[in-house]
């Protein structure tokens, strides 16, 4: 595991950064020339009067504080870059990962961290202090007094939000689950907790639908296959991990300037073509 001022009560992560322009909207691109044979976005079009779309995939897990900090760092980088380059648009897809696949039941959060840091209390305290300091820079204060457990059901809920409401609902679900698990210290392996998150404003998923999704073996297999594909096909070994354009992989927690530097490199390469 790449394993705090209080943040606003609700923070909706950006799914697409769309600057407000005064000109009339452009016609959609024909994206087929910059997709691979499977229809996945792998390239970006030449710069002209059209927008530049930069797709990102962000691999996360809900018991990893570094993942939540990375979300804020990445959001700040995208906001800054779009402010400087209003023709650029980012599209974010949130992807599941299990940092503790052997965790089968709920346990105290600190006990979980102790099991992941078997070298003693001193190293655990040092790790938590690094997390605290990094979180504080991004408006996050973490609660380790609660409980945590397997995250498969939480990832299934993200997939349900995506199917019902698209990327905006997916992003809001990810934000709410991160805050519930890491800031409020609640156990997102608990179906009742998940149902409460799903019923919140902006999501409004029916409690019965949530429980049906959590009990759906096919939904479980879909998430498991996605995690396996991340490891086997994409080489994702830990989270947080961000891939940009399907080509550039940024592993571990990174400050915003790492992403803005990468975005600038991509932008300059396209201008030079």
Image: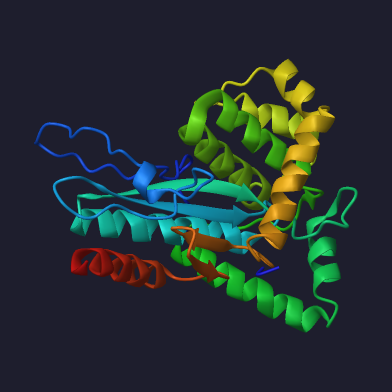
Q: Is residue 5 above or below residue 166?
A: below
Residue 141 seen from this side: no
Question: Where, by quadrant of the figure, is residue 109 drawn?
Answer: bottom right
Residue at 49%, 43% (x, y): give it: 39
Residue at 64%, 35% (x, y): give it: 159
In the picture, the quarter occupied by the C terminus is: bottom left
Using the image as rendered, state which of residue 36 and residue 9 is in the foreground: 36
Residue at 63%, 42% (x, y): give it: 177
Question: How far across and down, in percent of the image, does residue 179 sit?
Answer: 59, 46
Q: Is residue 43 above or below residue 249?
A: above
| Apparent side of residue 29 relative to residue 245 in the rendered image (left or right) | left
In the picture, the quarter occupied by the N terminus is: bottom right
Question: How far across and down, in percent of the image, does residue 65 sit?
Answer: 63, 60
Question: How far across and down, in percent of the image, does residue 82 sit?
Answer: 26, 54
Question: Where, by quadrant of the figure, is residue 22 drawn?
Answer: top left
Residue 44 seen from this side: yes
| Apparent side of residue 131 relative to residue 121 in the rendered image (left or right) | left
């Amino acid at each position: 595991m790449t394993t705090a001022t209080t943040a606003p009560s609700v923070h909706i992560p950006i799914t697409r950064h769309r600057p407000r322009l005064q000109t009339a909207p452009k016609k959609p691109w024909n994206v087929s020339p910059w997709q691979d044979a499977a229809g996945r976005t792998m390239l970006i079009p030449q710069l002209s009067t059209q927008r530049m779309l930069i797709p990102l995939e962000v691999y996360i897990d809900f018991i990893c504080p570094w993942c939540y900090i990375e979300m804020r760092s990445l959001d700040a980088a995208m906001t800054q870059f779009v402010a400087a380059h209003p023709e650029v648009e980012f599209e974010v897809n949130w992807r599941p990962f299990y940092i503790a696949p052997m965790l089968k039941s709920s346990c105290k959060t600190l006990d979980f961290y102790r099991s992941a840091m078997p070298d003693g209390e001193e190293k655990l305290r040092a790790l938590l202090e690094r997390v605290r300091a990094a979180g504080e820079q991004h408006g996050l204060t973490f609660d380790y007094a609660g409980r945590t457990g397997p995250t498969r059901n939480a990832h299934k809920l993200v997939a349900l939000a995506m199917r019902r409401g698209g990327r905006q609902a997916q992003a809001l679900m990810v934000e709410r689950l991160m805050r519930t698990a890491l800031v409020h210290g609640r156990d997102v392996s608990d179906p009742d907790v998940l149902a409460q998150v799903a019923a919140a404003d902006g999501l409004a998923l029916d409690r019965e639908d949530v429980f049906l999704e959590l009990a759906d073996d096919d939904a479980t297999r879909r998430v498991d296959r996605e995690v396996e594909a991340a490891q086997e096909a994409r080489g994702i070994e830990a989270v947080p991990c961000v891939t940009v354009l399907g080509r550039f992989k940024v592993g571990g927690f990174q400050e915003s300037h790492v992403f803005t530097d990468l975005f600038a490199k991509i932008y300059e390469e396209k201008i030079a073509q």
